[in-house]
Image (spheres, rainbow, N blue to C red):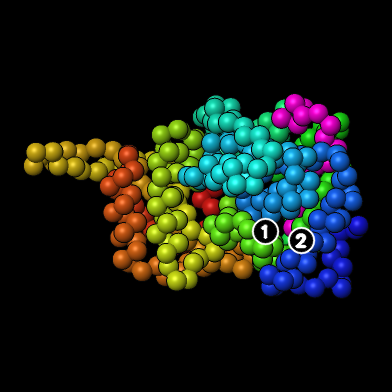
Amino acid sequence: MGNVRPATMERITTPALAAKFIDEQLTSLRAQIGDKKVLLALSGGVDSSVVAALLIRAIGQNLVCVHVNHGLLRKGEPEQVIRVFRDEMNANLVYVDAIDRFLDKLAGVTDPETKRKIIGAEFIRVFEEEARKQDGIAFLAQGTIYPDILESVGVKAHHNVGGLPEDLKFELVEPVKFLYKDEVRVVGKALGLPDNMVYRQPFPGPGLGVRCVGAITRDRLEALREADAIVREEIGKLPEIPWQYFCAIPDFQSTGIKYVDGKGERYMGWAVVVRAVNTVDAVTATVPEIPFSVLCAIRDRIIATVPGVNRVLWDISEKPVATIEWE
Ligand code: XMP
């Protein structure tokens, strides 16, 4: 099969069309794979999750899912991957706690592109090590989708096999490679994946690593993770959900004041930046109006519960000239 979506392929817009696609895929996946084993890097994003759910149906335990926790995932993500895939779908899931490895490698590194390179390279290394522990792998599954093929600069470099050594360059299994994102979501829903996985906002491969601005420290990263969970929860309640909404945490501190026994004490704390954007293609982005009451609710929860943070800022910068991510 080439890399051009067949002209006859119907757009998958309904549960019935998704069910038909799933049936066809199960047949062709079983024919392609037989009784061999398949390896998949399962990030928990919608694309790799849909591929995992399809392959679990097609070949069960012969799919080996590897979930690498690099310490830069959002709050609750690794737990959800384990719950949905290992506990509910009985997947053959290898969970790799690589948090220390990644954070040790990133310690003191301030340049954004160097951080990305370290995260990407370390990811391949961890995945390679796990692949070598497995016997009889014949295929590598990937959540490539049609826009990844159309855009020459794939944002999935992070999860790609490109960096794997020759002896681990298995034949690829890419069951959703002709689907657009909205179609992947319809298929994910039909496969029974939870809504917060299926309708998940885009999340960069380097994860919170590019939102913990400058040199990542564990305490600032934890503050970011907690604040980000609050922002996602509060903005996620709006009737119109922005394309992306998240937090960044710059690497500076500013003065705060707290009152102890009626006496003001000054101290230094971090500022958390709330960001929400709308975009069609991520090339340009606008900032949606967020009700002031929602911003205040976010501020109050962050200040009350996230250690080390004494300021909450609302980023109203559009792209261009600001990029969506802070790094
Ligand atoms: P920027 O910040 O360039 O982001 O306006 C545009 C879109 O790309 C995402 N993004 C990334 N995705 N790896 C990814 O997989 C990356 O290194 C990366 N950097 C930015 C960003 O979240 C936005 O959706």
Observer able to see residue 323: no
Where is residue 63 shown, x and y percent of the image?
75, 41
> Which label is found at residue 140?
none
Which residue is located at x 67 percent, y 58 percent? 191
Q: In the image, what residue type sits under mark 2?
A: Ile
Question: Relative to 313, is 163 above or below?
Answer: above
Q: Horizontally, is 124 left or right of 291 in the view?
A: right
According to the picture, the residue beneath numbered tag 2 turns out to be 22
Secondary structure, mark 1, is loop
Please report whichever mark, 1 or 2, sits nearer to the chain's N-terminal start. 2
Q: Horizontally, is 177 left or right of 219 in the view?
A: right
Q: What is the span of residues highlighted in magenta in the rendered image?
A: 130-145
Q: Nearer the viewer, residue 230 or 117?
A: 230
Q: Nearer the viewer, residue 305 or 15?
A: 15
Q: Horizontally, is 39 left or right of 251 in the view?
A: right
Which residue is located at x 82 percent, y 38 percent? 37
Asked whether 177 falls inside the magenta stretch, the response is no
Q: Nearer the viewer, residue 120 or 108?
A: 120
Q: In the image, what residue type sits under mark 1?
A: Leu
Secondary structure, mark 2, is helix
Q: Are marks 1 and 2 in contact (CB under 8 Å)?
A: yes
Observer able to see residue 218: yes
Where is residue 271 shown, x and y percent of the image?
36, 47
According to the picture, the residue beneath numbered tag 1 turns out to be 191
Asked whether 133 falls inside the magenta stretch, the response is yes
